[in-house]
Image (cartoon, rainbow, N blue to C red):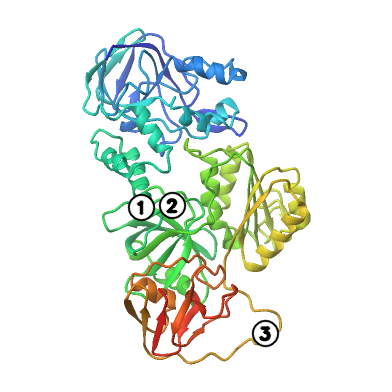
């Protein structure tokens, strides 16, 4: 391959970026003369957020000089900004592009020996730099992404030097191919498996490849319980505690879409409970659990500690923000309903190049007071750093420590006038609502009455279903046996039911895959035909079923033998 010309060198220090003053070293200055290069990158170049930038595998970012003509042609409104260094690169290179540079390429520039590790996936700061939400996704779509180097041998480099290819161990893996695979949800599993074995690949990119591969092989959800370890805990409010769960079986964390949940079971226990994943996975899964008296959540709060093991099934659920549109995003929650919204908010505000950036994000949350307000600092920080995020918190019963305008924005419950004030004028909005059943019904009705053009509404209900007014507060329930045999006629298996289990627990313990989401009789996804045997409900389900069906999540056997069409 012909040598490339190093046209320019750029370094930067963290500084406020965009209207919200987000700390970033995106804006860089040209370097005159020679500069030292080491394992950590170029002298004088720093990163604001080391969680996603920098490190040995992403020490130096290179970008093809020729791409700027294409950017100028496509986005002439940014003419004043386009030019070498404007996309945050350290090295502007002429003569090489993503189709001709391969992962693992060893390159010498002067005394410095470097190795290509991965493409760039832009974060939201690219949109902030140009005040244009289209650019992060467009960079990935076009393949004009550039690439990262790790430094094998340090030294000094200067503009005008030639970059020479020394070794190419992976000619089948140009950077453009990696970029295109990352943007393709239907990517070929064999190709991903091959890429995951490339030793020179950056480890953070390998983790993304393995996650995509897992999604393809499992159809997007795990059908067996896996062993996880509690890596840490964090109290988010006086009743909500987060648990950080890391795989303990040698595998990586499963791929999770923002808004999905996992099913958690205590080690040695037969009881399960579904909890939303409340943050984007970063080597672990975070669930945030509200303590409810007498249930599995109370057991977690009282007994589960760092180092303990839990069994995890999933992810599951269709209440997701897929990041496939730039339409306005609206997140409305109450109480612990904030948990899936946190993952959605983080995803929308930390674009990875494959997700679209919403043109606006409206976050509305209701809580009693500060003591009950989970994730207050995190949502405040996100809103403060992202000009497109509008955050409104309403307290129904502020405490003496609460200050209007600082801890909350208004007083009362979320109601129709508030929603009208915050949402009117939105077009084609994606609106997500999560909270107790009565909250869901009210907010859905109020949003519908606003008649927002093109709006789509998605809901997820938290909590047990509420009894209809006038219903018997203590209905008679048939006594269950001390033990029952549950038969899965379609699959030919069976499993034992014991007190404290639901029929859904039994099916999952028997390795039978069941569509389920709420695990509390609300969503109706686990409705299953009963072939023979009587069943009862521990609580009156909210969802309706057809004759002969039962909701497994809240049902138990009345007879000692029950046959199901599973």
Of tags 1 and 3, which is closer to the observer?
Answer: 3
| Residue plotted at (59% across, 72% down) | 543
The image shows residue 298 at horizontal and vertical percentages of 47, 72
First of labels 3, 2 by sequence position: 2
Distance between the alpha carbons at the discs numbered 3 and 2: 39 Å
Q: Quadrant of the C terminus?
A: bottom left
What residue is shown with label 1?
253
What residue is shown with label 3?
471
Give the left or right position of residue 480, taking residue 224 as reference: right
What residue is shown with label 2?
256
**Label 1: few (<14), some or many (≥20) within 10 Å?**
many
The image shows residue 109 at horizontal and vertical percentages of 28, 14
| Residue plotted at (60% across, 17% down) | 76
First of labels 1, 3 by sequence position: 1
What SS does tag 3 mark?
Answer: loop
What SS does tag 2 mark?
Answer: loop
The image shows residue 257 at horizontal and vertical percentages of 47, 51
Quarter of image, res 172: top left
The image shows residue 201 at horizontal and vertical percentages of 28, 34
Work out whether 329 lies above or below 244. Answer: above
**Label 2: few (<14), some or many (≥20) within 10 Å?**
many
Give the left or right position of residue 239, taking residue 560 as reference: right
The one of 241 and 280 positioned closer to us in this rendering: 280
The one of 491 and 538 positioned closer to us in this rendering: 491
What SS does tag 1 mark?
Answer: loop
- Asked whether residue 54 is in view, the answer is no
Contact, mark 1 vs mark 2 (Cβ under 8 Å): yes
């Amino acid at each position: 391959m012909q040598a490339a010309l190093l046209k320019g060198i750029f370094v930067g220090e963290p500084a406020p970026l965009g209207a919200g003053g987000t700390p970033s070293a995106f804006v860089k200055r040209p370097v005159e003369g020679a500069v030292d290069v080491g394992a950590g990158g170029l002298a004088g170049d720093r990163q604001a957020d080391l969680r996603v930038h920098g490190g040995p595998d992403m020490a130096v970012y290179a970008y093809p000089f020729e791409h700027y003509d294409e950017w100028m042609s496509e986005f002439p409104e940014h003419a004043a900004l386009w030019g070498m260094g404007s996309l945050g690169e350290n090295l502007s290179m002429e003569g090489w592009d993503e189709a001709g540079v391969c992962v693992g390429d060893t390159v010498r520039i002067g005394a410095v020996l470097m190795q290509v590790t991965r493409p760039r996936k832009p974060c939201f700061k690219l949109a902030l730099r140009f005040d244009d939400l289209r650019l992060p996704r467009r960079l990935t779509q076009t393949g004009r992404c550039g690439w990262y180097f790790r430094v094998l041998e340090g030294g000094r480099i200067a503009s005008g030097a030639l970059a020479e290819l020394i070794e190419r161990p992976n000619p089948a893996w140009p950077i453009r191919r990696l970029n295109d695979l990352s943007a393709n949800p239907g990517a070929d599993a064999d190709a991903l498996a091959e890429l995951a074995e490339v030793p020179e690949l950056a480890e953070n990119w390998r983790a993304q490849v393995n996650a995509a591969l897992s999604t393809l092989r499992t159809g997007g959800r795990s059908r067996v319980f896996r062993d996880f370890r509690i890596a840490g805990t964090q109290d988010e409010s006086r009743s909500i505690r987060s648990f950080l769960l890391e795989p303990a079986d040698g595998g990586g964390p499963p791929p999770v879409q923002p808004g999905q949940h996992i099913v958690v079971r205590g080690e040695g226990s037969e009881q399960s409970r579904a909890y939303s994943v409340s943050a984007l996975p970063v080597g672990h899964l975070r669930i945030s659990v509200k303590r409810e008296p007498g249930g599995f959540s109370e057991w977690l709060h009282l007994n589960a500690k760092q180092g303990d093991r839990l069994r995890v099934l999933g992810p599951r659920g269709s209440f997701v923000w897929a990041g496939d549109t730039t339409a306005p995003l609206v997140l409305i929650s109450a109480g612990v309903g904030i948990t899936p919204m946190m993952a959605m908010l983080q995803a929308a505000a930390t674009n990875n190049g494959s997700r679209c950036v919403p043109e606006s994000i409206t976050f509305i949350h209701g809580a009693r007071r500060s003591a009950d307000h989970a994730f207050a600092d995190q949502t405040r920080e996100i809103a403060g750093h992202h000009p497109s995020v509008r955050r409104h918190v309403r307290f129904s019963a502020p405490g003496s420590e609460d200050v209007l305008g600082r801890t909350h924005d208004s007083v009362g419950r979320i109601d129709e006038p508030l929603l009208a004030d915050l949402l009117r004028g939105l077009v084609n909005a994606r609106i997500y609502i999560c909270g107790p059943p009565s909250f869901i019904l009210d907010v859905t009705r109020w949003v519908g009455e606003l008649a927002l053009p093109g709006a789509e509404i998605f809901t997820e209900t938290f909590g047990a279903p509420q009894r209809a007014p006038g219903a018997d507060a203590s209905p008679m329930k048939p006594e269950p046996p001390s033990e029952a045999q549950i038969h899965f006629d379609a699959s030919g298996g069976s499993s034992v039911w014991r007190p404290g289990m639901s029929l859904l627990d039994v099916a999952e313990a028997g390795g039978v895959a069941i569509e389920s989401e709420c695990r509390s009789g609300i969503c109706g996804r686990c409705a299953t035909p009963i072939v023979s045997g009587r069943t009862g409900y521990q609580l009156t389900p909210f969802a309706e079923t057809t004759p002969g069906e039962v909701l497994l999540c809240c049902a138990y056997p009345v007879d000692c033998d029950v046959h199901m069409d599973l």
